[in-house]
Image: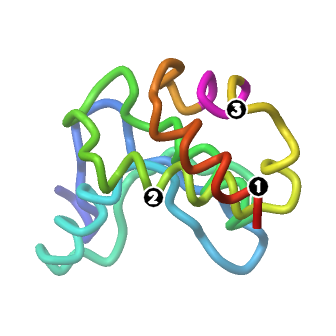
Amino acid sequence: MQDDRWEWKREPLPRLYYDGENYYPEDGHHCIRSARQAQKESIYCDAHPGTLRDAKFYSIGANRYHGLPRSNLDKRSAVEIALTDPEWCQTSDRAIADHWGNGGDRLLAGLSAWTRAM
């Protein structure tokens, strides 16, 4: 390392959204936490223009092709994020499930019915 930046060599890089003032992580939370624990000032990331809402939306689909399998708590959290958003809750369960990468999960249908009845 030539500077104080942590040279993370694994792919994919942590993915961030930047709204002109703040960075919001979509994926790579473990890498970011490790860099902080190593007391690094910065880390190489894949940054895109966007908002906190964008980061939340794309984080729901993160790790569907790599990483640890999602726990039931992870699944529930992803569904609740999608179903409590004013725009996303208007889409179909299938569209949310396709984005989330877990198309046949009964948890989505159960929480969806409960949330939309409120």
What colour scheme governs how the chains and residues are painted in the rendered image of this protein? Answer: rainbow
Examine the rendered structure and indicate whether residue 91 appears above or below residue 72: above
Q: Marks 1 and 2, how far apart in space?
A: 16 Å
- Residue where numbered disc 2 is placed: 77
**Tag 1's secondary structure?**
helix
- Residue where numbered disc 1 is placed: 116
- Residue where numbered disc 3 is placed: 93
**Tag 2's secondary structure?**
helix
Q: Residue at x 53, y 44 (%)?
A: 60
Quick one: quadrant of the C terminus? bottom right
Between discs 3 and 2, the one toward the N terminus = 2
Q: Residue at x 57, y 58 (%)?
A: 80
Disc 2 residue type?
Ser
Quarter residue 77 falls in: bottom left
| Lateral position of residue 45 relative to residue 90, left or right | left
Q: Residues within 10 Å of mark 2 (few under 14, many from 20)?
A: few
| Lateral position of residue 36 relative to residue 15, left or right | left
Report the mark closest to the observer, 1 or 3. Answer: 1
Image coordinates of residue 59 in percent, x first then y, are 52, 48
Image coordinates of residue 13 in percent, x first then y, are 38, 41
Q: Residues within 10 Å of mark 1 (few under 14, many from 20)?
A: few
Q: Marks 1 and 3, how far apart in space?
A: 11 Å
